[in-house]
Image (cartoon, grey):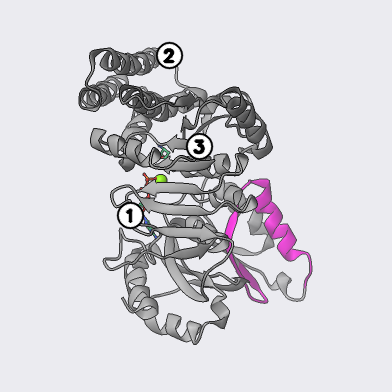
């Protein structure tokens, strides 16, 4: 069994969907195909949901109509025979009727999740219509029947595995399965999702659940690049990464992968391949247990970071101080990304300001608290970085002109993290590209 996941751009145009159909039927291995929503759809659904949350019904209606006409044209181009076109149009009608009904219902968080789920539901059903028209035997597996998260919003891998196993056993005559990325059920049984970009996470969870031979993530670029291609002009694809390296890059901002999507594949030792739908023969990136080579592999950046510095002379020679500080973050379920300490101060970074006022209030009794917003974590990721020749020298020489506010080194053998004000991010990534990679 293998898993192939196609992102929004890979299914965003009828001709791309046709190409996906070719890619998934190339070899004879049984395959679970995970699809995202058509590109732009989830953003449009988020906008509709925001309109409704703000009681802007007219704007919501306009956005719903605009999205519907996009889907009508999509169907017109995707399928050609009358019965299948009717079927595909009925899919569009069903989902837009739902969106029009919710215009009249009072808004809630549960409704928001229902709205966001429409994209993946439509893309998979439309793709299924196309496969049917082409005579390609397949089965649509509803993700809402097997993908679930618990009360802490953590995926329930063993439950997912047993439900998926049952579903597959019921259809042992089939070799091709299509399912939705991103969507799942939560602990209350409501429709929920794995957060933006979550289709990668679905793919990895399904691959781990099915003990797949490989989890292929097909996207619009030929693999993980050494730097952010949206910011830096000259970047190159990396041939091989370890699970740990890929997880660090994903967590620290490499958008090609959902931040937490590596662990399920890693747990079951399923290799992950990053491949380009537009260039299917390109090597891409393979992610396995082995790192392949020693040294720096890539740089990534995570925006929206807040630095909090707690300064206290009471920390001097005291024990238990850090525990008390960390307990405050635990209480407000806020995870810390970077930490640096001196004898009288501790600085941490967080990526959410949801509980910032409460956190600051509870930290104030410990000493003076300074908050710095609009920061970016720049992570340098690789294998056994410390053993790499003159790594720190090369790193700091290349970014001499950047006002670095925090440095974290040694926490993991795969990562050096720097905190810089976000206005310096692009410049820093560019400098590191030439300083570390000679590009
Ligand atoms: P999909 O819709 O297929 O899930 P995404 O847009 O989520 O695709 O991810 C692919 C995009 O990630 C690329 O187009 C690229 O701009 C961006 N990206 C950011 N950092 C990297 C990186 N280090 N390597 C490759 N792509 C990256
Ligand atoms: N459609 C969802 C999003 O845009 C999930 C995904 O594409 O991975 O975030
Ligand atoms: Mg993505």
Q: Residue furthest right?
A: 319
Residue matched to label 2? 105
Q: In the structure shown, which secondary structural element does the residue marked by tag 3 occupy?
A: loop
Determine if the magenta segment contains residue 319.
yes
In the image, the segment drawn in magenta is 318-346
Q: Does residue 54 appear in the picture of this structure?
A: no
**221 relative to 182, above or below:** below
User: Callout 3: few (<14), some (14-19), or many (20+) C-alpha neighbours within 10 Å?
Assistant: some
The disc placed on residue 281 is: 1
**Residue at 27%, 39% in the rendered image:** 16
Question: Could you say which is closer to the camera, residue 208 or residue 36?
Answer: 208
| Image coordinates for residue 216, horizontal then vertical, percent | 46, 48
| Image coordinates for residue 327, horizontal then vertical, percent | 71, 53
Q: CA distance from mark 1 to mark 2?
A: 48 Å
The disc placed on residue 30 is: 3
Q: Quadrant of residue 206?
A: top right
Q: Quadrant of ligand 2?
A: top left
């Amino acid at each position: 069994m293998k898993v192939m996941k196609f992102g929004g751009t890979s299914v965003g145009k009828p001709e791309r969907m046709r190409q996906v159909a070719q890619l998934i039927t190339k070899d004879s291995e049984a395959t679970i195909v995970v699809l995202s929503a058509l590109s732009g759809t989830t953003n449009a659904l988020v906008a509709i949901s925001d309109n409704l949350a703000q009681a802007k019904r007219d704007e919501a209606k306009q956005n719903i109509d605009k999205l519907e006409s996009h889907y009508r044209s999509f169907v017109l181009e995707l399928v050609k025979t009358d019965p299948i076109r009717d079927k595909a149009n009925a899919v569009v009608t069903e989902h837009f009727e739902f969106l029009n009904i919710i215009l009249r219902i009072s808004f809630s968080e549960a409704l928001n999740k229902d709205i966001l789920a429409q994209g993946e539901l439509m893309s998979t059903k439309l793709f299924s219509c196309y496969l049917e028209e082409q005579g390609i035997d397949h089965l649509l597996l509803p993700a809402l029947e097997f993908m679930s998260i618990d009360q802490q919003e953590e995926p329930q891998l063993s439950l997912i595995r047993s439900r998926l196993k049952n579903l597959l056993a019921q259809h042992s005559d089939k070799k091709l399965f299509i399912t939705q990325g991103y969507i799942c059920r939560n602990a209350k049984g409501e429709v929920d999702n794995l957060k933006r970009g979550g289709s990668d996470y679905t793919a990895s969870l399904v691959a781990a659940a099915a003990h797949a031979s490989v989890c292929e993530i097909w996207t619009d670029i030929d693999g993980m690049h050494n730097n952010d291609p949206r910011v830096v002009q000259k970047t190159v694809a990396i041939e091989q990464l370890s699970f740990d390296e890929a997880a660090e890059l994903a967590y620290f901002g490499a958008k090609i992968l959902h931040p937490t999507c590596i662990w399920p594949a890693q747990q079951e030792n399923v290799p992950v391949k990053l491949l380009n739908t537009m260039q299917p023969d390109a090597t891409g990136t393979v992610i396995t247990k082995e790192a392949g080579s020693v040294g720096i592999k890539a740089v990534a950046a995570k925006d929206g970071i807040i630095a909090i510095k707690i300064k206290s002379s009471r920390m001097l020679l005291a024990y238990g101080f850090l525990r008390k500080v960390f307990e405050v973050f635990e209480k407000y379920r806020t995870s810390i990304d970077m930490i640096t300490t001196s004898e009288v101060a501790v600085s941490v970074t967080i990526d959410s300001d949801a509980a910032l006022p409460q956190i600051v209030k509870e930290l104030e009794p410990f000493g003076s608290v300074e908050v710095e917003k609009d920061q970016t974590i720049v992570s340098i990721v690789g294998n056994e970085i410390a053993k790499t020749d003159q790594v720190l020298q090369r790193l700091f020489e290349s970014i001499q002109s950047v006002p670095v506010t925090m440095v974290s080194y040694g926490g993991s053998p795969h990562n050096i993290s720097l905190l810089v004000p976000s206005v310096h991010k692009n410049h820093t990534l560019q400098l590191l590209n030439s300083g570390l990679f000679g590009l």
